Each structure stands twice: as structure tokens, then as C-alpha cells.
Image (cartoon, coloured by chain):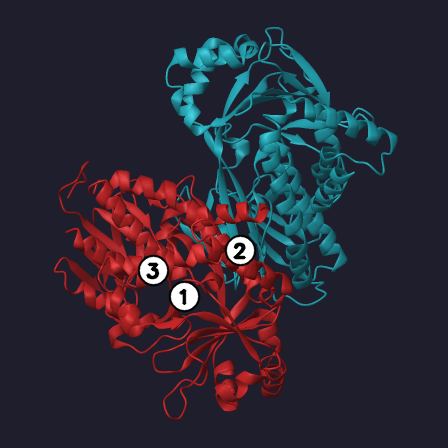
Chain colours: A cyan, B red
Amino acid sequence: MALQNGNTKKLDIVIVGGGLVGSLEAIYLAKRGHHVSLYEYREDLRKTPHVRGRSINLALSVRGRKALKGVGVEDHMVNEHGIPMRARMIHRPDGTTYPIPYDARTNQCIYSVGRNYLNNILLKESEKYDNVKKYFNHKLLKANLQNGSLTFLKTDTKETVDVTTDLIIGADGAFSAVRKEMMKQPLFDFSQQYIEHGYLELCIPASEDGGFLMPPNYLHIWPRGTFMMIALPNQDCSWTVTLFMPFKNFKDIDTEEKLLSFFKQYFPDSITLIGEKKLIQDFFGGSPSPLVTVKCRPYNVNDKALIIGDAAHAVVPFYGQGMNAGFEDCSILDELFQKHQDDVPKIFKEFSETRWKDCFAISDLAMYNYIEMRDLVTRPSYLIRKTMDDFLFWLMPDFWVPLYNSVTFTTMPYSQCVKNRDWQNKV
Amino acid sequence: MALQNGNTKKLDIVIVGGGLVGSLEAIYLAKRGHHVSLYEYREDLRKTPHVRGRSINLALSVRGRKALKGVGVEDHMVNEHGIPMRARMIHRPDGTTYPIPYDARTNQCIYSVGRNYLNNILLKESEKYDNVKKYFNHKLLKANLQNGSLTFLKTDTKETVDVTTDLIIGADGAFSAVRKEMMKQPLFDFSQQYIEHGYLELCIPASEDGGFLMPPNYLHIWPRGTFMMIALPNQDCSWTVTLFMPFKNFKDIDTEEKLLSFFKQYFPDSITLIGEKKLIQDFFGGSPSPLVTVKCRPYNVNDKALIIGDAAHAVVPFYGQGMNAGFEDCSILDELFQKHQDDVPKIFKEFSETRWKDCFAISDLAMYNYIEMRDLVTRPSYLIRKTMDDFLFWLMPDFWVPLYNSVTFTTMPYSQCVKNRDWQNKV
């Protein structure tokens, strides 16, 4: 089916990647009547247990909520599944704690949601649309982004499958195979940068009576300068605990004694919560995963291919915006499909020319928070600034929106949030 | 042959890329007695005419000269072949000119040398060593950088050739195939960034009596703010003229009338030198080439593979340091082979951990000069700064070395040159 200006024809669209962003985008495109084929490398996650090495839960905030609302699943995710986190709970090295609210005035909060649960909800939602077909166990081998042809390997039967389509949407994550094909285009700017820190997930189980072992409506943080630990609540009253630390420090902790002495020194209150035996098991049973920032542009190849989500702009997790930014891609794209009446050349051009500034901005903010979260949050200057910000915001909410709040609780373009901050810093 | 610490055994080394840096590195390694196989994608350039799309001549300065001296070809290149350029010659839009010397006090200069001529000299020099074997028309298809195996396609016979070696050195340029294999390694930082400008080469021929049509001992510059033109002298008394301009401006000049009116407005003195007919021919006969900056790290994979030259750090050409920085890689590596007595793990580790800072620095300087050369050079503030720099340098040569001079006329590490500049700016 050929593309035409002011297209009223329905398009054949291949989405590569059936994770959070790919499955949400499938619904958006299906709602507009297009024929969507969703190809996912992994098995249908509704049939498999959790894959270790990816984060278990995530913080859903306003940008993500807006995008979920557009396909009718926000209410369920926020009000039935999500656990509100109204403040950071800072754990001092002596085990004492104090909260730093996200937004004392309006009481807005972020929600801890399960990655797999949300992915399931989106895949299930897509089944309401006859025009979405899903293909699991399909690994992209190669693609021609000029003419819309793709070759997949069926990982179960080892057959290869050739597909030709009107549009290719790459939503296949930080190590995107679609983006690798894009790199063959001339004038494609690209960077991937790893940080010194890796992350390892641990777990605080539910209490014996099935409740939470820590106050649940908080994002718990153990900031320790060059490293830190955080914990987000799960729906079964357990906690997913993530230790962020330079790879070399992980490597240095090579005996049970060193591990326990390290935790006793820096995270004493967490040991009994996690349990010594479980701590040792989980620490030595896994290995730390790397964290990468990906920036690139343009996001499209002519009117044939587009990358979104982590494939286009993987960020480090320290602003809690990775999923939210990916979901925002979907709602922005939907607005552009509406604005340009499915005229793909115009949509891809506008998305590619405007979105990168905001993606670069949230990427830089996340890198900045990489230092702030584990370090500045414990310094007096941060608390003074924070108090003043909150006070001014309370006085003049429309005028003075602190950076974290504009990023997390508004849909103001990320680059605009940064510009405002520059201006506030001058005041 | 297995690697050992404090290796006295001779190694089998594959160098991918027989351009300037690859052929120089082959000689350095051969001098140390190693067995070098040099694989080049193209035909032996000694048998082929010039390939359009690569710069014809280059500015050789102190870092490059030092590296050439180490293999005994500096004297010939500088004193017999090279054309000294002692100053920039600025061409105003009205056709009048004035010089800005590189180094008025010590009269140091840079040398215009032919790319192919220098490549020929190096390939010829390598023939003095029985332990260098050269394979032209060999395109790298894939490599395993963990175990040192490579597969080449013979472009003439279409056969594939499998090779296993102790060491792989990738000197295969800005679009390096070895580096593509390196990108599969975890924790490999990489960025490629294209600039808005492309370049197109034109030519001012020799005069009818076989002399130069412009004063030869200058690098001629027509700075015009958002675009510029430069010219370097060739040994046959012609000039290679390079027009740097945003791609969109190239595209806008789509008729002979527009081209001539553009040149009349901005480069009036060049038209008669190039010749109207030849200008039209060359401008519309070619298409502008892109310019890319590549930064990455680490440069090695264990003790098996290393990238050098443009493969590791392609820079934009505005500081005249691309070739010089690549050649400096070779002399630094040679010093490390000497220091560590051919102990490859130590050599690769030290090179990879120390060299990137200087490569990032020259890359940033070249990007900075991308603006300075076409713009600031015509502003009064540049001339004042330049005059003061030169005066202070004349007074205190060991203490106050202007940035351009330390980059071009010393072997001070690039990152140190930048640090000095920061300090000077404060004064």
C-alpha cells in the first residue's frame, strides 16, 4: 500500500519490540485504524516468569499517565495497581530516616508500578483490536529502512521470515536492532555512553503477616556519595531494592564477609529487612548490569522508519523518566497523526525535528541527577534550595515550578523545564 | 604464537587499513621485528589514479614530522616534497588580502604535502622490511576481537580469506570496520557527530609558464562567516581549493548562473584563478562530502585488538591535525613498545587509558576552530588576542605558548595545550 499525502488509506505498520513502548504504540496506531504487526524477540511474557536483569518496578508520573489515559488504562494502573510514593525517604548511615516530599503543596505523587504487570495490561488491551497481530519469538535479523523490508528469525523453529511493510517503528530498546540499521544512513548522529556505575537488584520480602516492612508510600533512598541504594514498593508488599555502585566496587566485594561488613557500614538498617542469607544469595547470584545513555538524530528514515522510546533515547534511571519519556513519544506521535491526518512524511519530519531537543534535555537531567541523588540530596545546600523552591512554588504556583516538579508533574517539554531552571538559577 | 609478558617473541600482527596511519604503523612494528600483514580494501594506490572525495593535500606539522622522522622519511617529506606555509593569507570579499603569520618569532611553519605521495613513500619504505606483507583489494567482512580471527573478501576474485593473528590493529579510517566489531563489546563508549557543513574540492591550475597563480607559501583562506574556502599549494604548482558550506547552501546553488553569482559576490578573486568553465565543471561534477567527528573509548579489546588514527578519533579538518594526531598515535605506540619491551597487555592498557584525553581535546579544538576559522578570524577581537598572544610569546617563549602554536609546533599533549589555554584566558 503506497503512502500518499493526507492519507486516508490505512497503513501496514510493523512495530519492532513488544515491550512497554512498543505495545502502547501498537494500541495508539490500531485506534487510528492502521494494521499493526508487533514483533517481539522474547516469548510472550504472559507465559514466562520474570527475566532477571531488567528493573522490576518503575515510577509512573504525569507524562506516562497522560499516554496511558489516551488508551484507557491510566485509571486502572494508577488507582488499582500503582502504589503512590509521596516523598523520598532518606536513610542515614546510622539507620535513622527523614522524608523529602515531592510536592508538599498539591500532594501530587509518583506511582510504583510493575514493569511486567503494565506490559501485560497493554498487550491484553491490544487484543481488543482486530487490526493488531502479535508475533513473539521473532528476532530482527536485518531491515531495509528505505523500502520497508525486514527479515526475522523465529527463535523457536529457526525459520526466517521476510516481511514488507509501509512503516517500520523501532521500539526495541537501548540496544535497538532497528537503530543499528539506521546507523548505515549518512549524516546520522549517534552516541552511546556508559556510566561508571552498574546496578544490582535485591529484595526486601513482605512481612510474615503479609504487610510492608517499611513505610510504603515512599521512594526509599540510601545516598552514600559515590554509591547509593533505592527501594520501590511492590504490590505484593515486597520491595525491589537497587544498589547503584561503580563496577570496580562490585568487583572488590568478593567474599560474604566483605559483603556483610560493607552493608553493616553503609546500609545497616537494610540487613535485617533483606535478610543476611537472602542478601548473600542475591548479591552473588547476579552480576551488576550496565547503564547506558543513547542520544541520536534524526529519529526517522524518510517516511519509512522511525525509532521511539529507549531505541531513540535511552537514559540513565536517576530521574525516573525513561518509561515516561518513551510513553510521551506515543502520545506526541498520536497528536501528530491527528494534526497531520495520518500524513506520514509530515508526521515523521515534525517528530524528528522537534522531539530530540526534549530527549537530549531529559538525558542530561538524568545524568545530572546521577550525581545529585547519591550526593547532593544529603548536603545542606540542596535542602535550602529545595525549601526555597517549594516555598516560592507554594506562593506562585504558575510562575515558579521547581525543576523536579515540572519534569515529573507537568507535560511541559523537557527542554523548556531546563530553560526555566536556568532562569530560576539567575534569580 | 601466544602472547607472554615481557615478550621477546615476535608477534604476528594484522593491520587493517593501508592508508597513511596503517602504512606508517606497519613500518614501526616491522622495525621492532614483528611480522606484519597489512590489509587494504582498495587497490594498491601506486597503480591507481587519485580517488575523488578524499582530500588531496594535507598540512604536516610537528607531531606528524616527529612520527615520520622515526621511520626516516621526515627529511624527504619536509625538505624535498613539502611546500612550507608560513602564514594564513586572508582574502577579503573585495579581493584584497593580508597575511596572519603562524609564528612570527621562530618562523616555524606547516607543510603542504600530497596525501597519495606520502602514502606512496610509506608503502615504498615498508618494502625495505621482509617482515611486512601487503594485501590489497582485501575488504574486512568480520573479525572476532577476542580471539584474533578475521575474514576478508578479496574484491577482485570474490574469494573469502580467513586469517588468525596475535594482534589486530584497526587503522581503517573514520568508518572503521574494526571499530564496528568493537561496538559489540560491553561498556564501549562511542559517538559520531556530523557537522552541518560539507566540503567540495575545486582546483586552481598552475600558470601557463608552470608557476603558482597565488603566493605559494601560505594557506589561503576566504572566511565568510557561515561558510569559507581554503587553498593549499600542490607540488605541480596547482592549488587544491576546498569550499566548506552547509549542505543546504550547496543544494540551493543548482544552476550555473547561481554558482557564478555566488562566487562573484563572495570569492570574486578566485573566479579567474579557477576559470569559469572549470569552476562549473568541478562544482556540478562532484557532490559535497560530509565531515564527521568520532570519539570512542576504550581503544583496545583486551590484548588482542587496538584502533588508531581516524578509526579511533576522526576529527573535523579545521585544526589541520587529523593526520598529525594519527601519526602521533604511531610514535606514542612505538615509545610504549619500547618502554614495556613489547609486553602487549601493558602497552594496550596504557595507550587506551591515556591517549583518549588528548584525542578528545584535539577533537574539541577542531570543532572550536570550525567556527573560528570561518568567522572569528575576521573579527577585531581575534586579531587583538592574536597580537597580544604573539607579543607575550615573543617576550616569554617558554612560558606563554599560544594555543595554535602549542598544538601545531610542539608535541605537548593536546589536553595539556587546552589546559594551558584555560589558564591563559584567566590571566
Residue at point 53%, 45% (across, down): B423
Residue A319: image tag? none
Q: What chain is tagged by disc 2?
A: A
Q: What chain is tagged by disc 1?
A: B
Q: What chain is tagged by disc 3?
A: B
Q: Which residue is mark 1?
A: B107
The quadrant holding residue B15 is bottom left
Residue B100, image x, y percentages: 51, 69
Kind of residue at disc 1? Asn
Label 3: how many Cα within 10 Å (few below 14, some 14–19, many 20+): many
In the displayed structure, B286 sits above or below B293; it is below
The answer for how far apart the CA atoms under marks 3 and 2 are is 29 Å
Question: Tag count in the figure?
Answer: 3
Residue at point 33%, 57% (across, down): B327
Residue at point 52%, 64% (across, down): A147
Q: Which residue is mark 3?
A: B64
Kind of residue at disc 3? Gly
Residue A189: image tag? 2
In the displayed structure, A363 sits above or below B12; it is above
Residue B181, image x, y percentages: 36, 50
Can see residue B159? Answer: yes
Q: Does the CB distance between marks 2 and 1 fall below 8 Å?
A: no
Q: Which image quarter is the N terminus of chain B in?
A: top left
The answer for how far apart the CA atoms under marks 2 and 1 are is 40 Å
Select label 3 or label 1 by which is in front.
1
In the displayed structure, B199 sits above or below B322; it is below
